Amino acid sequence: MKRSENISQVGYLRLHRTIGPKYNCKHVYKTTHQTHQFLTQMTLLIDNMTNTQWLQTIATSNTEVYQQIADMVNIEGYPLDDIRDFVEDYGLNAFTEGHYHTWEKLEETYSREVIETWVDIAGIDAIGNLEDYYMGAFQNEEDFAEHYFTETIGCSELDVLIEAGIVIDWESTWYRNLSYDFTFENGYVFNRN
């Protein structure tokens, strides 16, 4: 697929998912530049919609999702702005598959930054696996390497060696032994396995 077709398709899917099928922009513009201009204008339109207008577009395209959102806001007390941000960032499919609820549950234990970092790494479909893969927050890779070998694995011999004056190159330890199995991003470490 050519790059211009890819941009057009991605833009079309985002708009179709966000504002509903009644606006068919798939065949409107042929060039990347025209498509970019159109998408910019539509993004501004979507961003300038009130929540009521946004909900109306959802109601027009999918009444079941509209009812689910209305119940979550009116009965369960979820903030509509949060739901809208989630749908605009990750799409209606992610919302209907329960990823919004999973995200909200995870925020009881983890910071939003940890969750966002995990989703950036693994994708929204992997949000339910955060608890299994999150290793913690660390200043840098070296701190994690030291923590991993002294605390997680429990190498008591290391303490004796360090007290005896042996210097361990934790940076090299990270790159040689751990960077293949773990990801360090935004100060957080996640297991890749």
Image: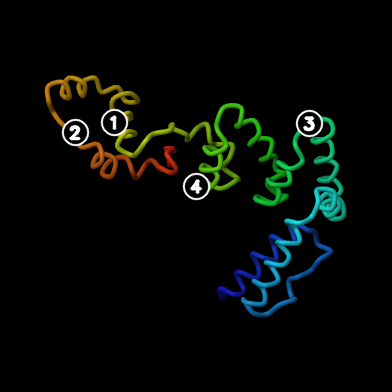
- Report x, y in % for residue 136: 44, 31
Give the number of the disc on residue 171. Answer: none
Task: Farthest residue to the bottom: give it.
Answer: 30
**Gap in Å between the C-alphas at discs 4 and 3?**
30 Å
Point out the image quarter for the N terminus: bottom right
Q: Which residue bears the numbered disc 3?
A: 77
Q: Closer to the N terminus: mark 4 or mark 2?
A: 4
Point out the image quarter for the C terminus: top left
Q: Which residue bears the numbered disc 2?
A: 168
**Gap in Å between the C-alphas at discs 3 and 2?**
52 Å
Near-viewer residue (3 or 89): 89
Q: Closer to the N terminus: mark 1 or mark 3?
A: 3
Circle 3: residue type: Gly
**Gap in Å between the C-alphas at discs 1 and 3?**
44 Å
Q: Which residue bears the numbered disc 4?
A: 121
- Report x, y in % for residue 124: 60, 46
**Gap in Å between the C-alphas at discs 1 and 4?**
23 Å
Give the number of the disc on residue 146. Answer: 1
Circles 2 and 1: CB atoms closer than 8 Å: yes
For residue 193, say whether it is visible: no
Q: Closer to the N terminus: mark 2 or mark 1?
A: 1
Circle 2: residue type: Ile
Residue at screen point 73% across, 46% down: 84
Task: Report helix, strand or loop for mark 4.
Answer: helix
Residue at screen point 75% across, 34% down: 78
